[in-house]
Amino acid sequence: MAIGASEPSGSLAPWPCRAPAHGCPLGPGTAQAKRRRAGVSLGQKAGEGCRTVPLAGHVGFDSLPDQLVNKSVSQGFCFNILCVGETGLGKSTLMDTLFNTKFEGEPATHTQPGVQLRSNTYDLQESNVGLKLTIVSTVGFGDQINKEDSYKPIVEFIDAQFEAYLQEELKIRRVLHTYHDSRIHVCLYFIAPTGHSLKSLDLVTMKKLDSKVNIIPIIAKADAISKSELTKFKIKITSELVSNGVQIYQFPTDDESVAEINGTMNAHLPFAVIGSTEELKIGNKMMRARQYPWGTVQVENEAHCDFVKLREMLIRVNMEDLREQTHTRHYELYRRCKLEEMGFKDTDPDSKPFSLQETYEAKRNEFLGELQKKEEEMRQMFVQRVKEKEAELKEAEKELHEKFDRLKKLHQDEKKKLEDKKKSLDDEVNAFKQRKTAAELLQSQGSQAGGSQTLKRDKEKKNFF
Ligand SMILES: Nc1nc2c(ncn2[C@@H]2O[C@H](COP(=O)(O)OP(=O)(O)O)[C@@H](O)[C@H]2O)c(=O)[nH]1
Ligand SMILES: [Mg+2]
């Protein structure tokens, strides 16, 4: 197996992988799908009155499945895995073990303030089959004190991939055959090997995800739990999932070629797995294992853990079913809700088919009606505001007038007071002047009388001598 270029976290560049299950030739071309569809279409055609005609010789359309396989192989495939689980539960190690390689990536710390998703895309090659593999892993899951919203970034990520696909599908010029489908095909949910019961974080997260993605629950680090405890733990987990109404992915049993193995494997869920990047020589073979002072745990030994079962079910038997379920069930549900939210529907209230054009017209009229209503509301609001402002201005004007009158009156009173004061001062001045004149007159009379007496006294003095 060879690893091609990897992309930085979160960037999913276009790659000419095969088209999604519905548009891809391999969907109908797989053994499972072929059988399922054949059963349906033959029955329908007979009912519709199609005539079966014998062929006189070999025509060649029996090579159609081969053509489809060749086309799909040349286009390549894509598969997207989401690993959800607490930090340190062995998500990265298990991915390395599953794909028998070492995907680069720094181990996450326990100090993240919130949950994030780290996405990496790799080009893998096995024989002549190319696989564009995207591994998305949670970072910081379960590390916060308040875990209430831990599921939200995961749900948002899954929805964002559906939305991107829907937007591509709704484009006028869509290029779905070269579009890099980033929708999550499977969610491996890592459960801590506590041996007790599921944590509420696990139950809440799985419940929020079960209508959006195929969930395969796995007990991580299964070497940390004894065999008898593991059996009880599996039963406990299954009963808790059932009692909380969590729908996990069931390996399909409608295709007889895989019905038996899938049926058996469904009973083994959740798989208890061990991951290791170490290879040890056991006998004369190199094997992935974990070595402890008391012994060695072999990853691929079915007596030690369910790793082989997981790899078999996930990659070798049901990879195409997981892709198909993602498209036909989870994406379909998202698409339906989204289109209904946008006002599209298939039938009118009388159950008559509703065309896209009619839906568009109805939506347009509804929109125009709402626009008009809004316009009218805004106009009314504007008129009301103007009226209010006018009243406010009038009130202010009235207040100003009153203030002006008050001030005017004050000014007049002040003026009158000053005039009165001036008048009284003038009167005082006049009275003073009169008194002054009288005083001066008196003084001048007094001085005249004084002068004639002095003359008389001088005359008397002369006569004496
Ligand atoms: N005992 C045990 N340890 C494991 C197992 N898988 C991984 N580990 C170890 O657990 C630690 C964290 O693993 P890692 O893959 O980085 O965890 P992640 O944070 O979930 O990606 C590493 O030291 C691994 O070697 C396992 O199955 N059993
Ligand atoms: Mg990791």
Image (cartoon, rainbow, N blue to C red):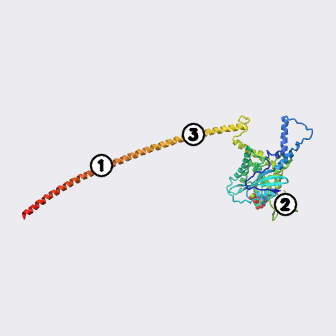
Quadrant holding the C terminus: bottom left
Near-viewer residue (388 or 462): 462
Comes first in the chain, label 1 or label 3: 3
CB within 8 Å, label 1 to label 2: no
Comes first in the chain, label 1 or label 2: 2
Q: Which quadrant contains ligand 1?
A: bottom right
Quadrant holding the N terminus: bottom right
Residue sitting at x 63%, y 39%? 370
Cα separation between marks 1 and 2: 126 Å
Task: Pinpoint residue 85: horizontal percent, then vertical percent.
Answer: 74, 55
Residue sitting at x 71%, y 44%? 338
The amino acid at mark 1 is: Lys
Neighbor class of circle 3 (other Cα within 10 Å; few <14, some 14-19, many 20+) is: few
Residue that mark 1 sits on? 423
Task: Pinpoint residue 136: horizontal percent, then vertical percent.
Answer: 75, 54
Task: Pinpoint residue 42: horizontal percent, then vertical percent.
Answer: 85, 39
Residue that mark 3 sits on? 379
**Labels in figure, total:** 3
Q: Which residue is outermost to the left?
A: 464
Distance from mark 1 CB to nearest ligand 1 atom below 8 Å:
no
Cα separation between marks 1 and 3: 65 Å
Can see residue 437? Answer: yes
160 lies above or below 277: above
Q: Image check: 273 left or right of 204?
A: right
Tell us which disc is closer to us: 1 or 2.
1
Under tag 2, what secondary structure?
Answer: strand
Comes first in the chain, label 2 or label 3: 2
Residue that mark 2 sits on? 287
The amino acid at mark 3 is: Arg
CB within 8 Å, label 2 to label 3: no
Under tag 3, what secondary structure?
Answer: helix
